[in-house]
Every structure is written in C-alpha cells, then in structure tokens.
Image (cartoon, rainbow, N blue to C red):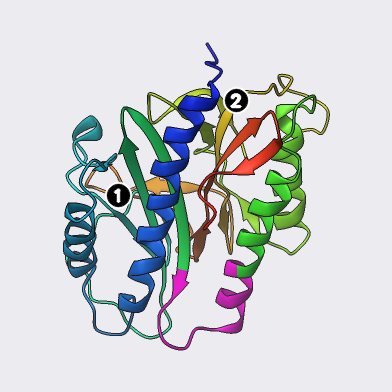
Amino acid sequence: MIVLKSAEEIDRMRTASKYAMELLVGLRQYVEVDVRTSELEVLCEEMLRKRGQLKAAFKGYNGFPYCLCVSVNDEVVHGMPSGRQLRSGDIVGLDFGAVYKGFYGDAAVTYPVGLIGSNAERLISVTEASLYKGISKAFEGNRLHDISHAVQECAESEGFSVVRDFVGHGIGRQLHEEPQIPNFGARGTGIRLKKGMVLAIEPMINEGGSEIVIRENGWTAATRDGKLSAHFEHTVALTDKGTEILSAL
C-alpha cells in the first residue's frame, strides 16, 4: 500500500533528508588516499551525535551493524565500513539515511579518491545525470516507470548498464515503503504518480554488465564481472507546489 504524506509529514522528511545529504557532503573532505572506511563510520557517528533528535536509519536495520554504507569500486550497495584502506583511483559510494521525529530521509553520493581514470569519472557523471533525468519525470500525473525509463535511457545511451536486482523505493515512516522504483522500464507504464508521494530515487549504474553477486557478509552487493559501479540517491516529494528534492542542499 502506498501511503501519501501530509505537508507536516513531508516537512519532517525534509529535515531528515537534508541532514542525510549534509552529512554526506561533510564526509567528502575525508574521502582521500590512505583513509580507512572504518574512519568514515567513526566520523559519521561523531557528526550524528551533534544533531540531537536525528538518528541513523541503517544501524540495526535487519541487523546491519553500521550507520553508513561505504561501497568501494565494484561494490554496488551495502558496503560495510570495516577498515578497507582507500587508494588513489578508487571510487566510493556513500549511502546514509536519517530519522527525524519518526520519519526517514535517504541519500547517496559517489566520490573519487585521488586521481581516477576517465571511464570512472564518466561513470560517476552519467550516474548522477541519470538521477536527475529520473527526478525530472517524477511529477503528479506521470507514470512510475517514466522515472525508470529516463534513468535507463541515460545510462545505457552512454554504454553503461543498470542494476536490476536493487531498486529505489517509497519512504516515510518506514525506510522502505511502496512503491518499488526500478531503474529500468517502459515509458508510460506503472502506477500513476500522485501528490503526497515521497520517493527515494537511486540509480545504481555499472561500468560493465548488470549482474551482481552478494558477498560473504550477506549484505554487500558487487558487480559479477568486477567492474566499477556508482550510486546516487535523492529523496523526492510530490507536493502542492510541485516536485521537491527534499535532500537537496
């Protein structure tokens, strides 16, 4: 069931979403050569403690042990910040969710470490562009898969592939709500979008093939062919005033 949100509920989600992105932007300066992913988790927790009513969405979620997801190179999503040392040429996906007064916000970015290759740079750029292409189709009266098609078209037109095993999602009182939002699909299909919907749109785009594997920790998804993957996410609301990116700073 899709739960439509009131203006007051969206306001709480705006606070959670903006903080999620604010934290990710704050971590940017620490994503550098020789830093360990565990250090990013410690910094995340320190930032969170300073914000009082805000809580981390991921820690303890279905047993996930960290506040922050840190996915390096071929890791698509749900990477664990367990101590890997970053090296020049790596790309790092950071995913963070926050809770404010019972409502969730979710955001993700991908950052370069040191000097990265031209294809890695292009992958990051195209993945972020595909997010905004998807968001441009998220408005009342449109169809859900109009978002999906826009993401897929942007990524595949540049020679990249779209992850099909993980999707975006509705968000609200729960981190994951209906509807699911695939990053591929046929234009003009899917449910009709309505005012009050809040969506976490999150393209996961691979340098090579779309197939993924789950690592031994039971959480981390990685590309089957070992090639790079990038991830961006915004929380978006359909409001009386139009479409708003709640996690935009």
Residue 123 is covered by the magenta coloring? yes
Could you tell me residue 249's position as x and y percent?
52, 58
Instruction: Establish if 218 lies above or below 81.
Output: above
SS type, badge 2: loop
Q: Which residue is mark 1?
A: 215
Res. 207 in view: yes
Name the amino acid type tagged 1. Arg
Depth check, mark 2 against mark 1: the one in front is 2
Q: Residue furthest right?
A: 188
Q: Amino acid at mark 2?
A: Met
- Identify which residue is drawn at 58% across, 64% down: 207
Residue 43 as seen in the image, left or right of residue 126: left
Q: Label 2 neighbourhood size at 10 Å, few (<14), some (14-19), many (20+)? A: many
Residue 197, numbered circle: 2
Tag shown at residue 17: none
In reply to whether residue 235 is colored magenta, the answer given is no
Quadrant hosting residue 196: top right
The CA span between labels 2 and 1 is 33 Å
Q: Residue at x 17, y 44 (%)?
A: 65
- Mark 2 or mark 1: which comes first in sequence? 2
Query: Residue 135: x and y, percent?
Result: 68, 45
> Magenta part of the protein: which range?
111-124
